[in-house]
Amino acid sequence: MNMNIRVILSITAFFVVVCCFPVQAQNILVGLGGGGAAFSMNSAKTYNQEVAELLSFTPKLTDNFPSYYYYKAEVLYSFGKIIAAGINVYTTSTGSRLTLSDYSGKYRFDNRQKGIFPGIKLLFGKAPALANGLCFALEGGLAVSSMTFDEDLSVFEESQTYTQDFKSFGYFVQPGIYYYHQIIPNVQLAVNASYYLGMEKGYHIPGEKDQVIRSSKTNKEIKPEWDGCRAGVTVYWNFSLQTTGK
């Protein structure tokens, strides 16, 4: 069985087990949030340098995979007073641009990357079962990334364009801390700080996993490197459940 399918099935099974757990579940929290994310993207930055060196002119690097917003949704179940678990998914994107223009024409090379990250989340601490408190979090799951090259060269009245899509699959872990605060009954606000550590594979042409893009100098794979710090805010709606155990 494909490893990516195994991960998806494991996440689904985890969610089903959590939903069916009959004894200790205290409440359900449904959260929507967002924040800022920083990325390393070292191999993609190196590839940009190689593209610039191949040209007969020197383009300017106007964007170089800057930090950007992320958005997430999650469902958590609180067990007892110190443990919560659930599933979540979040997405983010970044990119770069090489460009140059003068009286004779213009050049543009865009590298756009987007990631979607479904996973499992564990919380250890007095919250969110209690109104306010600090939690330690551990997240992990599947990293699904896409990259698009968009190149355009126009000289006088002639124009050439090139577009290519790439895909990548991998895994991630993300430890962090959360502080939960109840703002009104059944609504909590959480601020968080965490660090994303990825184990992604190289980008390949969709449907052609052996067609991996590599550095022309080092022969290393060009891959998504979402590694970096995360900080954000999440709003949770708390739906209490009646316990069935003693």
Image (cartoon, rainbow, N blue to C red):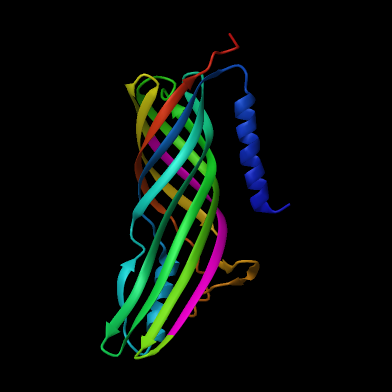
Relative to 231, say whether 48 is above or below: below
Which residue is depicted at the point 60% across and 33% down? Answer: 15
Relative to 41, say whether 35 is above or below: above
Which residue is depicted at the point 60% across and 28% down? Answer: 18
Which residue is depicted at the point 45% across and 35% down? Answer: 137
Relative to 9, say whether 129 is above or below: above
User: Viewer-proximal residue, 109 or 25?
Assistant: 109
Q: Does residue 202 show up? A: no
User: Viewer-proximal residue, 15 or 159?
Assistant: 159
Span of residues in magenta: 160-177
Q: Quadrant of the C terminus?
A: top right
From the top left corner, tell me how far across and down residue 166 is, in percent. 54, 67
From the top left corner, tell me how far across and down residue 59 is, in percent. 32, 81
- Taking the view exactly as shown, the residue that stands out farthest to the right is 1
Which residue is depicted at the point 65% across and 69% down? Answer: 208
Q: Quadrant of residue 126?
A: top left
From the top left corner, tell me how far across and down residue 24 is, in percent. 56, 17
Q: Quadrant of residue 191?
A: top left
User: Per the image, is 148 magenta?
Assistant: no
